[in-house]
Structure formats: C-alpha cells, structure tokens
Image (cartoon, rainbow, N blue to C red):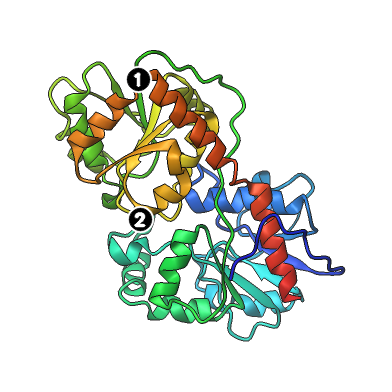
Amino acid sequence: MSVSANTPVLQCSDMKLLYDARYIRTDFHDGISRYSTELGNALAKITDVTFLISDPAQVQFLPKKAHYIQIHAPTSPMEPFTSTALNKLEPDVVFSPMQTMGAVGRKYKLILTSHDMIYYRHSTPPGNINGPLRVGWRLYHMTYAPQRIALNGADIVATVSTTVQREFEQAKLTKRPIVVIPNAPQKFHTHKVVQKKIPTNIVYMGSFMPYKNVETLIKGMEWLPGRTLHLLSKITPARRKELTKLIPKGADVRFHGGVTDDAYEALLADNAILTSASYDEGYGIPVAEALAMGVPAVISNIPIFHEVAAGGALYFETDNAKQFAERIKELDDMAIRKKLIQHGLQHISSFSWDDSARALLNTIKSLV
C-alpha cells in the first residue's frame, strides 16, 4: 500500500491523534530520534496532535505550545502493556515511529513503524543497548516471529523507503498494509558551500558499528594523500583504537568524537565530499543532507543509496577501498562534480518532511 505525499489531505474532524515522541534523544539525535522529531513537527503544522513523551527534556524538541502527555519510557517493563494506559486517553489513532509499543487490548487504530531489516543480517546490537536488553535484542532478531507478532498488532505498518518496503514484502514480515512515510534531510541554513578545484575534506557521519564498514574508508586513504577523512560521530575508546590501527602511513584521518549540527554543516560546506561504505541502511540521512546542501557523495553500491541519491552520487563496491579512492579522485574534475551536484539537488527535492507529514496524515485519516 502506498500513499502519495502529493495527494490532498483527507478531511476528518474531531479526531484525537497521539504521536509517540518517546524515541527523541535529549543528548544528540540518532536516525530514529531525528525521524521522530522532524516528522512530528511537520505533522503538527497540518493537524492537531498530542505527543507522548517519557522525559520532560523531550519537550524542547516538540513544536512550541505543543500538547503532550508523559507516560513510561519505551524501555520500561510496562511497554508491552502500553495499550492499557492509552485506552484511558481515548485516542482515535496512535502513531509510533517504532514497532515495540504494546497493542494487546487496544481500543484505537494503530500505526507502527519499522525502519529496516539490518539487524537480521548484521547481528551486533547497537552500543547503547546493555545488560538484559542486549540479550533480549539478540533473541528478538534471531527469527522474524517476534517482529511479525509486533507488526501484526497494528492496523498499518509504516517504513521509511520503498527499498525497505520491498524487503518487508519479500520476507512476509506482516499481514498489514505497508506504507512508505519517507525520511528526509534536515534543512541547513547557515554555511555557504565552498567547492574548490580539488575537494580536500571527506566527511563521514554515522555510527561505527561493523555493518557501517568504516574500515574501507580508512584503508582507502592510502591512495588519497593531501586529503582528510573526517569521522564525526561519537566513538568508544576501544573502537577508536581498533580503527586507528588501520590508518595507512601518512594518511590524515581525524576522529571528532561527536559534533554539533552546526559543526557538521560547516564541515560539509568546506570543500567536502560526503561518503559512506555501509553494507546496509534503512535510508541514509547523511547522504540526503549532503545532497540537499549541494555537496556531492561517494557511497557504497547498495540499493537504498540508489533510491536516496540516484544520479547525485558516485558508487563503489562496498569492500573495494581502492575503488573508493578512485571515485573520490574523479570529482577533481569540476565538470563532473557540478553535474553530480545538480542531479543530487534535483533528486533530493522529492523528499521533504512536509510531504512525509502529509503522507502520514492521509494514512491516519484513512483509518478513521
């Protein structure tokens, strides 16, 4: 099932809508936190919505004067019984940007979101999951059964790209209709992009989990003297030590240990190329953000990146470090770079949070 963002929004009055904003991080945004924040803010511009939070600090990321209700955290033992608490609020529709909300006994329509199937293919849990949750996470991803049970508890399942939608359908992950509520780039405003004769800054924004394959980027710096690979995200000391050993002699690889949005934008704007060697993604927000700024991308040849970047990027085979370096050097040709940037800007304009919010609202109103 697909809902066009360009379709006029269906009209429906007196609808009580709850939006699950409990996945918004209060330290720095990860992909789901950014999705929750941007989609929620865009949705609030076109309909009345009440946000569910679990931490008062999340309020700062909601629209001004937003109506919100605090309930338990999504990691609480109460999560399987969330429907009991929400039934008392008498909503018509509840939307969650994740799939783990308890649905048994609910008296409202429910849309749950699953972002990708990465962890069925790459079994290492995220670094922020510890203790018993880590064990539970591994058990959850051993088979499709737990996810099928969770998603079939909804009326509609949302995901962030048509690539992932096809994967869900092929795996028969749910009996429910699957709609695409796309991710989109955040809007940068401050820094003017500078493109010089030879791009000297190569920017990576993302985690350092094994499936992100940062190793290939580091190894590729052997053939890129005079350029700097900027690794922007937070990293554990152990993982940094592991990756540092791979840095070729004489190569310039810098670990930033986490940066603000402004510092991220400044680096992208400074004669840069955005890169990723990831084996797997649900969408690829940094790629979209770079293209929206007019920054070219050199990225791994995986289906989702072709959906997000299309002709706005050059592609290399995932484990081929030398080919990565060759693609970077191709952009020394200003004509190729300008053409790539033009294609990227044109393509990424088809993704926006306002369009995604309209697609979500059409989906919501189709239920009531």
- Alpha carbons under labels 2 and 1: distance apart: 39 Å
Taking depth in this image into account, of 83 and 367 the one nearest to the observer is: 367
What's the amino acid at mark 1?
Answer: Asp
Judge from the rendering whether residue 272 lies leftward or rightward of residue 357; answer left or right. left
Sequence-first tag of 2 and 1 = 2
Instruction: Name the residue furthest right.
Output: 13
Q: Are marks 2 and 1 in contact (CB under 8 Å)?
A: no
In the drawing, does residue 45 fall left or right of residue 327? right
**Residue 264 makes an appearance in the image:** no
Element at badge 1? loop
Q: Is residue 361 left or right of residue 160?
A: right
Residue 32 x, y percent position in the rendering:
51, 54
Q: Which residue is labeled 2 in the image?
A: 126
- Residue 246 at least partly seen: yes
Dot 2 falls on a residue whose secondary structure is loop
**Percent of width and height locating residue 91:** 75, 73
